[in-house]
Image: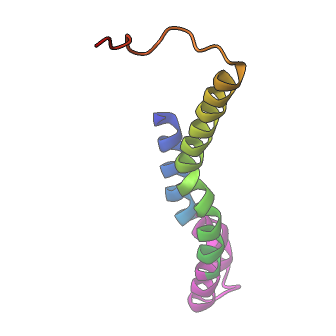
Amino acid sequence: YLYFDVAKWSYIQFGVMVPYIALGPTLIAGVVTLGVMQQIVRAFGRVESAFQFLVLSWSTVVELLSVYKRLRAFERQIEEGDPGEPVAPAVTG
């Protein structure tokens, strides 16, 4: 899923710049100091890392969902009782 990887890494890279872009005008206007801005950026980073858990583990979640779907289809096939052809010919001795 290349498109998901591109979106994931774009989100992560853009997330680093968001607090600086949001706080840039207030820093230039002199409303906040550089130290206060760094504290806000650090707090934003902690919140962002909590959200990144879902983004970073989404491929594992999708993989587990596909395994679950395959197992459910396999169990349904077993419950229908349609054995079909034997897997290997009977051994005669």
Quarter in which the C terminus is drawn? top left
- Observer-nearest of 9 and 14: 9
Instruction: Judge whether 57 appears above or below 86 on screen.
Output: below
Q: Find residue 55 and report its horizontal and vertical position in percent.
A: 58, 54
Q: Find residue 60 and report its horizontal and vertical position in percent.
A: 53, 49
- Observer-nearest of 19 and 26: 19
Instruction: Judge whether 51 appears above or below 80 on screen.
Output: below
* Residue shown at the point (52%, 57%) measured from the top left: 12
- The secondary structure that dominates the magenta segment is helix
Structure colour scheme: rainbow
Total numbered circles: 0
The answer to if 25 sits in the magenta stretch is yes
* Residue shown at the point (53%, 56%) measured from the top left: 56
Is 89 left, or right, of 61 in this rendering? Answer: left
* Residue shown at the point (61%, 87%) measured from the top left: 39
* Residue shown at the point (64%, 25%) measured from the top left: 78
The answer to if 4 sits in the magenta stretch is no
**Where, by quadrant of the figure, is residue 42 drawn?**
bottom right
Q: Residue furthest front?
A: 93
**Where, by quadrant of the figure, is residue 31 drawn?**
bottom right
Q: Find residue 67 and report its horizontal and vertical position in percent.
A: 56, 38
- Observer-nearest of 46 and 17: 46
Q: Which residues are magenta?
A: 18-42
Q: Find residue 25 and report its horizontal and vertical position in percent.
A: 66, 71
Q: Residue furthest left?
A: 93
**Where, by quadrant of the figure, is residue 34 drawn?**
bottom right
